[in-house]
Structures are given as C-alpha cells and as structure tokens.
C-alpha cells in the first residue's frame, strides 16, 4: 500500500474533522504539526495525534477516525505518547490548536516541541 503524502492543507482538514468526529482532548506533535506551525511546504506520511487521557479506547477511536477519512491505519500514529509522557509536566505545556464541537486538539509549546525533538 502506498502511503499518502499529507500536505499542510490536508492536515488542516484532518484536524478540523478531528474536532468534529473525535471526543475529548488530543495533542498533535511531529511532522504534521511542523507543517501546520512553521514549515508549510513540508509533507508527511503520518499524523502523530495523542489522546490526553491514557485509555485504550482513544487509540481505537483514532483508528476508526483514520478509516472514516479514507486513510490507512498507519497514517495516524499514537505511539508518540511514549515520548510525550516521558517528559515531566508535559500536560502543563500545551496550547490550543483547534476546538471543534466534540474534541479539542492541542499542540506543545515551543519548549516542549524542542524537548520532544531532542529526545
């Protein structure tokens, strides 16, 4: 299966759809965030979207969301939660990116983003 290249415009539409179709609070990190935030020419093959609550149902909800958007499951990546949750106080360093009717999507502050990228 060929993975789709996701442009800034496609990522914006996905985040808007996430606000309407997902539930609860989520965090966008990684290359998809970079495309939205400071590198609009960037394309990526996945969207690192992490639920704020650590519950298995959120991961399944994300997979259902990907399929509903016509994307392969591999397009949504919730494995970034491993790295996010290793940073002490990470939840205190989030800024609202998009609020929909059912869900909100946050992004890390610049400091948290750099910590995540530095590993």
Image (cartoon, rainbow, N blue to C red):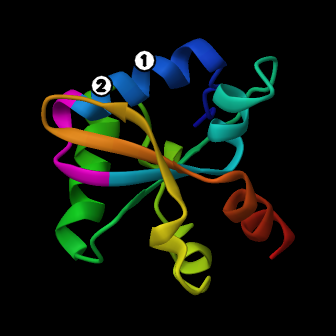
User: What residue is at 50 percent from the left and 56 percent from the top?
Assistant: 94
Question: Does residue 70 appear in the picture of this structure?
Answer: no
Residue 115 at x, y percent in the picture: 77, 70
User: What residue is at 76 percent from the left and 19 percent from the top?
Assistant: 40
**Count of numbered tags:** 2
Label 2 environment density (alpha carbons within 10 Å; few <14, some 14–19, many ≥20):
some
Q: Is residue 18 left or right of residue 86?
A: left
Instruction: Report which residue position mark 2 lands on.
Output: 17
Instruction: Report which residue position mark 1 lands on.
Output: 13
Is residue 22 within the magenta segment?
yes
Residue 75, relative to residue 108: is it above or below? Answer: above
User: What residue is at 16 percent from the left and 47 percent from the top?
Assistant: 23
* Nearer to me, 33 or 74: 33
Residue 88, relative to residue 83: is it above or below? Answer: below
* Outermost residue, right side: 118
SS for dot 1:
helix
Residue 73 at x, y percent in the picture: 42, 47
* Outermost residue, front side: 92
Residue 43 at x, y percent in the picture: 74, 27
SS for dot 2:
helix
Tag 2 and tag 1, C-beta contact below 8 Å: yes
Range of residues picked out in magenta:
20-25
Residue 71, relative to residue 75: is it above or below? Answer: above
Q: Quadrant of the C terminus?
A: bottom right
Q: Is residue 112 left or right of residue 65?
A: right
Q: Quadrant of the N terminus?
A: top right
* Nearer to me, 83 or 110: 110
In space, the residues marked 2 and 1 are separated at their CA atoms by: 6 Å
């Amino acid at each position: 299966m060929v993975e789709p290249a996701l442009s800034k415009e496609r990522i914006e539409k996905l985040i808007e759809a996430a606000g309407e179709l997902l539930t609860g609070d989520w965090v966008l990190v990684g290359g998809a965030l970079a495309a939205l935030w400071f590198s609009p020419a960037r394309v990526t093959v996945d969207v690192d979207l992490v639920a704020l609550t650590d519950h298995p149902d959120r991961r399944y909800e994300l997979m259902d969301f990907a399929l509903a958007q016509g994307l392969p499951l591999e397009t949504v990546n919730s494995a970034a939660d491993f790295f996010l949750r290793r940073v002490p106080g990470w939840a205190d360093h989030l800024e609202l990116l998009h609020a929909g009717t059912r869900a909100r999507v946050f992004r890390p502050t610049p400091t948290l983003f750099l910590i995540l990228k530095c590993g």
